[in-house]
Amino acid sequence: MQKKSLFLLTILLCMIFTSSLVFAQIEENLERYTEGNAVGYIKPLVNGIGANMNRGWYHSAKIPKNGIRLRIGLVAMIAPFMDKDKTFEAETEGTFTPQQTAEASTVVGSEKSVSVNGTGGTTYIFSGGLDMNAIPFAAPQITVGAIMGTEATLRLFNSSWLNMGGDSEMGDISLFGIGVRHNINQYIPLCPVDIAAGVFYQKISVGGDLLKFTTLHMGVQASKGLGPILLYGGIGLDNSNAKLEYEYNGEFGKYGVSMDVDGDNGVLMTVGLGFNFLILHLNADASFGIRTVYSAGLNFGI
């Protein structure tokens, strides 16, 4: 058990460390952009992280009507980026003349910057990206229940607990999430599958006020056990938003920029496969909507 716990912690730390490096570079690149270009530059990352955060909340629709439900584990998600996420139509800013547009890299696009020439031999440079093909995410979570067919799931983490904040360039990464699900098939006599409905809320902040994500997912899930094998799926509605605050470093000095960016919000479907061995529960699934997200989980408990 100690080795398994160390393995889970290693995965989580790797993802958090990667995220810290990513956001440190993002803040530096954003300094060249005001709100107009910044939205186009950062939106693919908001889409990917928002989609990730809404995944992994469930791996079965079976909830006891009354009894003990206690499961602790780690879920990991990854959202691949599409070709259209790599570039956006950017505009020159400030006093640069003549005003021009260019196909520039988004935050997940090519590392190469794009430049255009202006009057008097001037040059305007659009920031490059981080050349990312996918964005990972991980979260520890605990599920408790059940009372009248209802269970609750909690996600909670702060990098300061591991002395990762404070002296680091990005400061703390904090995560809070809570979800509630209810057994539906208890109201349907002789129902051949387990059915549940739930709502899940989550927020994460990186580097203080640099990026603050909030997500909400509502949906219905179904599952069917075949011995230790479990087939499950769900359909639901995603909503995600990010608030971004940074300093624009322009030709007349620095000033603060604050903006809201909505993620890819819409309906999606999840299909998954699970394996249950006494207190060990493994699962993997894929969610299909505006974008595709893959998720896997490792949980211990009853």
Image: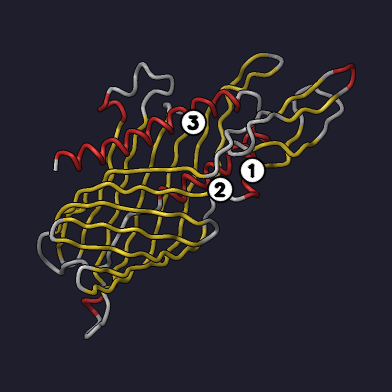
In the picture provided, is 239 more to the left or to the right than 257?
Answer: left
Q: Residue at x 28, y 63 (%)?
A: 274
Q: Which mark is residue 86?
A: 1
Task: Please tell me whether mark 1 sits on a helix, a strand or a loop.
Answer: loop
Q: Residue at x 32, y 39 (%)?
A: 11
Three-letter code, disc 3: Val
Mark nearer the N terminus (3 vs 2): 3
Among the 4 quarters of the image, the one containing residue 221:
bottom left
Q: Give how far across and how far down residue 91 sits, in percent.
A: 76, 34
Q: For the C terminus, which image quadrant? A: bottom left
Three-letter code, disc 2: Phe
In the picture provided, is 79 more to the left or to the right than 90?
Answer: left
Q: Which mark is residue 22?
A: 3
Mark nearer the N terminus (2 vs 1): 2
Q: Give how far across and how far down residue 8 sits, in percent.
A: 26, 41
Three-letter code, disc 1: Lys
In the picture provided, is 65 more to the left or to the right than 178?
Answer: left
Q: Are marks 2 and 1 in contact (CB under 8 Å)?
A: yes
